[in-house]
Image (spheres, coloured by chain):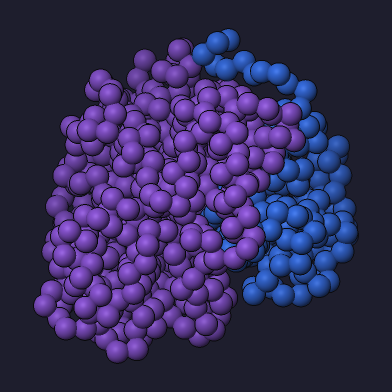
Amino acid sequence: MSATIAEKIFSQRCGRPVRAGEVVMAPVDAAMIHDITGPLAVRVFREMGGERVFDPERIIMLFDHQVPADSIPAAENHVFMRQFAEEQGIHNYDLLEGVCHQVVMEKGRAAPGEIIVGTDSHTCTYGAAGAFATGIGSTDMGFVLKFGALYFRVPESILVEVEGAFGKRVGAKDLILSLAGDIGADGATYMALEFTGRAMREMNMAGRMTCANMAIEMGAKAGIVAPDAATWDYVTARRDIKPFDLAGDADARYRERRHYDVTDLAPQVAVPHNVDNVVDVTKVAGTKVDQVFIGSCTNGRYEDLFEAAEVLGNADRFADGVRVIVIPASRTEYLKALRGGLIERFVEAGALVEAPCCGPCMGGAFGLLAPGEVSLSTSNRNFRGRQGSAQASVYLSSPATAAASALYGEITDPREV
Amino acid sequence: MRVWKFGDDIDTDAIIPGRFLTIYDPAELAKHAFEGTRDEFAKEVQEGDVVVAGSNFGCGSSREHAPLALLGAGVKVVVAKSFARIFYRNAVNTGLLPLVSAGAEGIRDGDTVTVDLAGGYIEANGRRLPIEPVPGFMKEIVDAGGLVAYAKGLDEVKTCNTE
């Protein structure tokens, strides 16, 4: 029977064929909790009468939203979570490793065919590893911690076939922003996006993570990149697992098949205050920026920092009056960038380089905007008030566009630099 | 019951901004509901008021602080043309009733509405607007009074691979 990738994953985990639309109580392969949504999940677990978690080895705990603790309540939450990890025998990455989604991927905690949940909407990032991964609330997580399973409505899928080759200084972030603009903020609600095609196959894992990460910005439950040799190379380097085939069938019942060609795609920018409000960079070039943030689970990897540094080139300094905040997504990515000389270049050029964490994207820890200020960010959301004042404006772009804009103090087409 | 009317794509950062996420008490969260985007809400909202919105209500972050902030403000029902997936589940799980009505857009701010769940409609200004039934498996959770109450009575669950 032909099936989508999402249907195949649920069928495999259920041991019988299941179809889009079916509601199943499915076993969960891994569950991620962090410092913001974790404490509530733990309280709910206890309210539900939970004493021992279903399997401590399948629970991933870490802190990334408010680290190092930026307030006494945040510090108290960290203590509360540490005590829970200790009591339950859960390995806690604490605040040492970085942003949750990057850490789950690089520690090999996600693999093709798995069902993974996390109390963070960008949990869909692990679709880059071929997993069915979705964000849930803390009460659902309390249930998962107790039972190791959760109700899922098996989603319909939209097939996104991406052909062509990216032009100079255009890449994964531009693709996913253009898709958000095209599909809309709720165009994929309750559905899975399944990415395939030449441009996806030629994309590195960092780019695939950027794409899967932003599936939620179209309302999708999951964003899955069809696993290939690159996926298996990444996963098998991190865990003992035997590769197998996992692809959507040609005659599977997709809700929709969308075709894109990236050959002539221009750098894209999401303008305030919605992620689907997307234009070519040329439409907003010249907009003054007060802050540029390069980082986050969307674009905080070595490849992203390299892309930004390449645009920076031999320039002495970022523009006067622009605060440039660079935050590697994990300790591992930080070390790669450090050893590659990127961190030195950023600091020389006047950037503030912070330790791995969610940073300004969290909208509460630091890097907040005053009323009237403008930020260009490589993160995933430009909602009103997301990075501070509701009277501030947030634009979203690729690392290349962010670096070009930091050089000139205004939104700048990276192809022109 | 007074209607607080909102537009499309109301995100969870608008419902409760990120800087308040160390708070978990619904009454405390309610003091900051819609802070920065609609400041009068927290000051003037009354027990039993209804939030009415357009499409994609609750998009964005998975923060359950959003339905909790509304519950803390005394809001027990949100009516929208459509909901973002995670918010919808969080609402059902925490006991905030999310109702889908294609006619939500016709309801105005300040209107008085009554909700007739058994009858399957909301009444606003003398007009009856049909509401979609809550999907089967979600209804069980609604009827139990939320997921905590539903889960309390269970020692284990039957998963699809052990049925």
Query: In terms of depth relative to the viewer, which is nearer, A257 or A348?
Result: A348
At x 48%, y 61%, the residue is A68
* Chain displayed in purple: A
Q: Is A4 left, or right, of B159 in this rendering?
A: left
Of all residues, the one furthest to the left in this rendering is: A314
Q: Quadrant of the C terminus of chain A?
A: bottom left
- The percent coordinates of residue A2 (x first, y second) are 35, 20
Of all residues, the one furthest to the top in this rendering is: B163
Of all residues, the one furthest to the bottom in this rendering is: A320
Which image quadrant is residue A23 in?
top right
* Chain displayed in blue: B
* Above or below A238: residue A63: below
At x 35%, y 56%, the residue is A329
Query: In terms of depth relative to the viewer, which is nearer, B50 or B23?
Result: B23
Is residue A258 visible in the rendered image? The answer is no
Is residue A356 visible in the rendered image? The answer is yes
- The percent coordinates of residue A174 (x first, y second) are 28, 60
